Amino acid sequence: MNWKNLEEKDRWALIISALQAFGVIGTFVVALFGLHSVAPIITYQISQQEELRQAEAGKHSSVAEQFVGDVLHWWTGQVDSYQRILELVSKAPEQGWNVKFDVIASDVTDGPPEAMADLLVVSATDAGGKQEVVKVAVNDKALPPSQYIQCKINQGAFSKLETATRQRVENAIGSYMHAFMLPKVPPAYVNEDMSLEEIQQEISLRQRSRKEAIRQIQVLKGIIDAALEE
């Protein structure tokens, strides 16, 4: 097609078509440039959202770890003390230890529930005069794990969580405790009129249940994490 042979109206038609084509190309270039410019912003926003999500998950995880860690630290201390008393009493004859005990009634009337229990204090003295003393909560006010957990909840262990999340977590813990941690692990009941052998028997009676409660407490972290993620 020869430009010179075209009529004027055809020439204008070609010119308009060419301008339209350039317009489309220009729009595409502008869009491409704009997408390139916006891409870092979108990426940054997504990155920020992911960081916030991870921070929230980390905060929730620390809540579960702190709560379960506190309960485990307290209860394993109780179990270890009971176990050590059993060892001191059983090994006393062959080791030549002089083992004595005392039951001290708590005089705490206004404090944390775990401080209101009576204490069994067992001392073992070897031939060289070296003494080991072990104390453990006993009798009615000695808390089982489920009661200690409930006390921590009542004291506001999850108070920093949003109301709906806190209720969900506390309900999940309550359901788990009623399903797997009750009946309660009873304390050892001792008095000053008992012999060392009787105290040993009383402690031994529930020691397996006390150790099983450690595993039940460990499972709590998964229960709390699942409730936090809902």
Image: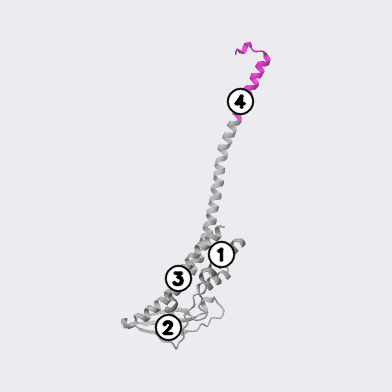
Amino acid type, label 2: Ile
Q: CA distance from mark 1 to mark 2?
A: 37 Å
Tell me the residue at 51%/66% (across/down). Answer: 67
Q: Of marks 3 and 1, which one's residue comes earlier in the chain?
A: 1
Give the numbered dot on residue 199.
2
Report the mark closest to the observer, 3 or 2: 3
Q: Are marks 3 and 1 in contact (CB under 8 Å)?
A: no
Q: Are marks 4 and 2 in contact (CB under 8 Å)?
A: no
The residue at which mark 1 appears reads as: 172
Tell me the residue at 67%/14% (across/down). Answer: 8
- Does residue 228 appear in the picture of this structure? yes
Q: Is residue 99 left or right of residue 33?
A: left
Q: Secondary structure at mark 2?
A: helix
Q: Of marks 1 and 2, which one's residue comes earlier in the chain?
A: 1
Amino acid type, label 1: Ala
Q: Secondary structure at mark 4?
A: helix
Q: Of marks 4 and 1, which one's residue comes earlier in the chain?
A: 4
The residue at which mark 4 appears reads as: 22
Where does residue 166 sit, x and y in percent of width and height? 59, 63
- Does residue 131 appear in the picture of this structure? no
Tell me the residue at 60%/64% (across/down). Answer: 167
Report the mark closest to the observer, 4 or 1: 1
The residue at which mark 3 appears reads as: 212
Q: Which residue occupies the foreground of this view, 227 or 46?
A: 227
Q: Of marks 3 and 2, which one's residue comes earlier in the chain?
A: 2
Q: Which residues are magenta?
A: 1-26
